[in-house]
Image (cartoon, rainbow, N blue to C red):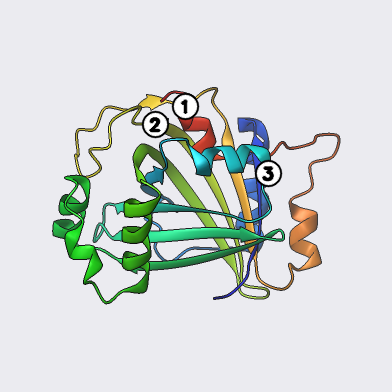
């Protein structure tokens, strides 16, 4: 499992436009993006009754993890189960595909099939559903605009129009009601493997302004 550096910052709209225009000249669009260079993402996050994942994120716990199911709306409409972990400042992610039938069973509370599944990540989620009472907690939806650069395996994304499904976890519904999560911000995420080229770092500099850390999950959990 490849360790990745990952940094997140909230931007105002003006800074987003400035940085996006800079990156367009140097980095290429992700191949999965549409003709506008973006795609819509919907994530279903799991947490315990005591909100363990949320509290560890807010408290900055060094070793933490969270489970989510991600849906890339449009195209082939992928469903992906993911576990994201953070250890000593580095991020790790493992994932596997889910079918719509498996997701429907999981959302209905039918998890017995997971115990017999051969995928280790599915078995791990099953164990934590049983023993930590992990449950679907909230839906986060947003538009993502990704840029990539081969040296260092750099991936820079802008997430905007961040919305929450409040208490709804009807993940597959095309008519899911959502509300805007807080003020109109754009979330910048910078990810890379061992290094990030110096000229990319310079492109991301905003003189006289300091970006603040932000989490989409924490932002949306304010509302439910």
Above or below residue 61? Residue 139 is above
Which label sits in the foreground, 1 or 3?
3
Q: Which residue is mark 2?
A: 164
**Circle 2 SS class:** strand
Q: Kindly identify the residue that appears in the image at 31 percent across and 59 percent down.
A: 126
Q: Which residue is mark 3?
A: 60
Q: Kindly identify the residue that appears in the image at 19 percent across and 33 percent down.
A: 175
Relative side of 58 to 37, left or right? right
Q: Kindly identify the residue that appears in the image at 21 percent across and 54 percent down.
A: 103
In this view, the residue farthest toward the right is: 208
**Do the numbered discs 3 and 2 sit on residues whose CB atoms are within 8 Å?**
no
Q: What is the CA distance from the residue labelled 3 to the residue labelled 2?
A: 23 Å
Which label sits in the foreground, 3 or 2?
3
Q: Position of residue 186 (x, y in %)?
A: 57, 36
Q: Which residue is mark 1?
A: 181
In this view, the residue farthest toward the front is: 131
**Do the numbered discs 1 and 2 sit on residues whose CB atoms are within 8 Å?**
yes
Q: Position of residue 187 (x, y in %)?
A: 58, 40
Give whichever of discs 1 and 2 has the lower sequence position: 2
């Amino acid at each position: 499992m490849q360790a990745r550096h990952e940094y997140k910052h909230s931007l105002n709209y003006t800074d987003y436009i400035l940085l996006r225009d800079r990156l367009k000249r140097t980095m290429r669009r992700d191949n999965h993006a549409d003709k506008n260079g973006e795609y819509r993402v919907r994530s279903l996050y799991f947490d315990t009754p005591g909100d363990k994942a949320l509290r560890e994120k807010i408290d900055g716990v060094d070793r933490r993890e969270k489970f989510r199911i991600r849906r890339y709306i449009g195209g082939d409409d992928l469903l992906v189960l993911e576990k994201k972990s953070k250890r000593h400042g580095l991020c790790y992610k493992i994932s596997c595909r889910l079918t719509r039938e498996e997701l429907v069973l999981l959302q209905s509370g039918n998890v017995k099939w997971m115990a017999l599944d051969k995928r280790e990540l599915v078995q791990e989620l099953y164990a934590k559903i049983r023993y930590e009472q992990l449950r679907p907690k909230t839906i986060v939806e947003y538009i993502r605009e990704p840029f990539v650069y081969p040296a260092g395996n750099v991936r820079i994304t802008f997430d905007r129009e961040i919305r929450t499904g409040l208490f709804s976890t009807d993940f597959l519904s095309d008519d899911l009601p959502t509300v805007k999560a807080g003020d109109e911000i754009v979330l910048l995420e910078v990810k890379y493997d061992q290094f990030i080229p110096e000229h990319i770092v310079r492109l991301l500099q905003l003189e006289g302004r300091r970006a603040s850390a932000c989490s989409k999950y924490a932002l949306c959990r304010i509302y439910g």
